[in-house]
Amino acid sequence: MQYGSSLGEERVEELPEFPKCESCGSGLLALKSKVRSDVPQILEKRKSRVELTEEEQTVLSRARRAADLVLSYGRQAAIALLTWGVGPQTAASILAKMHVRDEDFYADLLKAKLRYIQTRPFWD
């Protein structure tokens, strides 16, 4: 899984349909703005076979789910994941609908965003 640095900062509309890492060519890319800043350190820790805490495993799992979506759905996954209140689980359910029209895709993203806004105050 590649994290941010080799991708640089790009606008979503400038991304190719299926983005790849400029360094290694991998399509397994995590969006820097959607994962915690300590993901690179957690990845290094995992690569060196140091046992991860439960929280670190959760963080890495979430980043991996987001990267899997970008690998599978490309720019459309990036758009979904960058929508406020849409995480990997919600994005996956929206992307799985395989919308024929872009309008339907964006309507589902808007519904998810509104659902997040309405329900977020009741969490915790």
Image (spheres, rainbow, N blue to C red):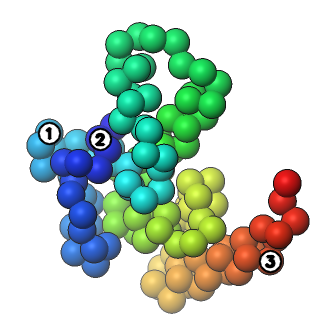
- Which one is earlier in the sequence, the residue at label 2 or at label 1? 2
Measuring from the top left, give residue 85's x and y in whole percent. Answer: 63, 68
- Which one is earlier in the sequence, the residue at label 3 or at label 1? 1
Q: Secondary structure at mark 3?
A: helix
Q: Secondary structure at mark 2?
A: strand
Amino acid on which the number 1 mark rests in the picture: Cys
Q: Residue at x 80, y 77 (%)?
A: 118
Instruction: For the residues labelled 2 and 1, say whether their Cβ atoms are less than 8 Å apart.
Output: yes
Q: Residue at x 22, y 75 (%)?
A: 14
Per the image, the residue denoted by label 2 is 2
Measuring from the top left, give residue 78's x and y in whole percent. Answer: 40, 64
Q: Residue at x 46, y 84 (%)?
A: 102
Q: Is residue 107 visible?
A: yes
Per the image, the residue denoted by label 3 is 118
Measuring from the top left, give residue 50's x and y in whole percent. Answer: 45, 11
Distance between mark 2 and mark 1 Cα atoms? 9 Å
- Which one is earlier in the sequence, the residue at label 2 or at label 3? 2
Instruction: For the residues labelled 2 and 3, say whether their Cβ atoms are less than 8 Å apart.
Output: no
Corner quadrant of residue 13? bottom left
Q: Which mark is residue 24?
A: 1
Corner quadrant of residue 44? top left
Q: Secondary structure at mark 1?
A: loop
Q: Nearer the viewer, residue 31 or 36?
A: 36
Instruction: For the residues labelled 3 and 1, say whether their Cβ atoms are less than 8 Å apart.
Output: no
Please identify the quadrant where the C terminus is shown.
Answer: bottom right
Amino acid on which the number 3 mark rests in the picture: Gln
Q: Which mark is residue 60?
A: none
Locate residue 28 relative to residue 5 in the image: left or right.
Answer: right
Measuring from the top left, give residue 9's x and y in whole percent. Answer: 24, 63
